[in-house]
Image (spheres, helix red, strand yellow):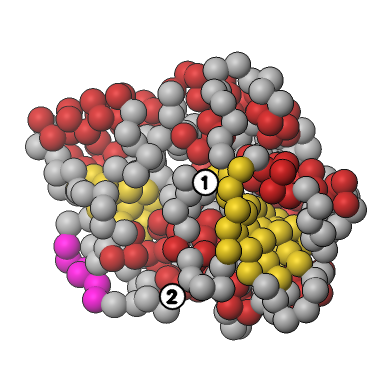
Amino acid sequence: MTADRAEGLNHPESLELWQDWARSRTRARRAKHAVSGALGRSRRRGADAGQGAEPAWVLRSREGEDAQRLLIAIDAPSPTSRAALLAVLPYLRCGVDVLSRADLVVPELTGEEWSERRGDADELLAGAEHQAVVSTGHNMGAGARAHELARSADVPELVIQHGALTPFAPPLPPGATLLAWSDADAEFWRSGRPDVTTRTVGSQLLWQAGHESGDVDRDARPVFLGQMHGAELPRRLTAGTAYRFCRMHEALYRPHPAETDALSRAAHALMRRRGIAVAPTDVPLRELTSPVVAIFSTGVLEAAARGVPAWVHCPDAPGWVHEFWRRYDMRPFGGTPTPPLAAAEGEPAVRIAGIIEESV
């Protein structure tokens, strides 16, 4: 399959093939730090050389109104992952255990109702009885362990979509139920697999963005959202597109928080030397009031949901990027801004919590 495959994933079934691609891109670019932990079972057994010692894990637990228990696996503290996995917590009646690396800072899991244990992941999960598991996929450490538990205990495995989907997304776990943003995303990620069930629930991330509408400065200089860290496109395209756009339209360049590698820092320095303003990364996207532009960032959808003018731009984009733009109705720069993604009524987290309660 090629990168221009428009109807679904490049690797719709094989996690191993996806991992081979991810590792090759990581070695080539020394970037995409989220993929560096995406080793699944091979990492657990130390099979992937150079990944270092197994990290410490933490299991945070909260009692429920009944004996049923849910395991949530979270691999990243990003706003997208937290919106997908943890916004449901106020609406759940069952007991909850949340597995993550010990170094992850997750504000939602603090408070008197939460207890925690640290140590080896297998030991933390040993003897626990969970009636369902929830994650954003089985391609990273905590999600891989949740998947193994679901398979060994024969309990439902729910995967919640947390970001916009490209053909380079990892495959869904065998037998999983996908809770997708839209029918189109559900079919895209499923990629024709008969073992995967899908349910459309909407995006909690975009629902929250739509309720955070504030001041908008439509006449401000546009901000180009950087994606040099991404493994999906070559750096010459992501950096070159951003550079030319910022020069032509006097836009600010906002690096992605993951653009910390040497090549990205060198690109930022070159931009500054050539008169391009580089915006700080410590201002959350939800606080930007200026128009935004990107190649294929979920930030375009977030901005549109908040009422901020948002567009996409990449004159040399490959075919899959154009399919991506069509699926999310992202509009090219120079025309009508991207409209908010159509959403079902009500808060997605409430709908997701109801599906979880049905599963446990």
Image position of 191 (left or right of 342) = right
Q: Are marks 2 and 1 in contact (CB under 8 Å)?
A: no
Residue at the image position 73 percent from the left and 49 percent from the top: 125
Q: Quadrant of the N terminus?
A: top right
Asked which quadrant contains residue 95, the reply is bottom right
The percent coordinates of residue 142 (x first, y second) are 64, 45
Which secondary structure lies at badge 2? helix
Check if residue 266 falls in the magenta segment: no
Task: Give the label on residue 102, or none.
Answer: 1
Q: Nearer the viewer, residue 60 or 286?
A: 60
Q: Seen from this angle, which residue lies furthest top? A: 49
Q: Amino acid at mark 1?
A: Ala
The secondary structure making up most of the magenta span is loop
Image position of 114 (left or right of 296) = right
Which secondary structure lies at badge 1? loop
Residue at the image position 41 percent from the left and 45 percent from the top: 295
Residue at the image position 25 percent from the left and 66 percent from the top: 289
The percent coordinates of residue 207 (x first, y second) are 50, 73
Q: Which residue is mark 2?
A: 210
- State whether residue 82 appears in this view: yes
Task: Give the label on residue 59, or none.
Answer: none
- State whether residue 355 appears in this view: no
How packed mark 2 is, by other alpha carbons closer than 10 Å (few <14, some 14-19, many 20 or more), is some
Image position of 187 (left or right of 280) = right
Label located before the other in sequence (2 or 1): 1
Q: Amino acid at mark 2?
A: Gly
Task: Please state the extent of the stretch shown in magenta in the rendering.
Answer: 215-220
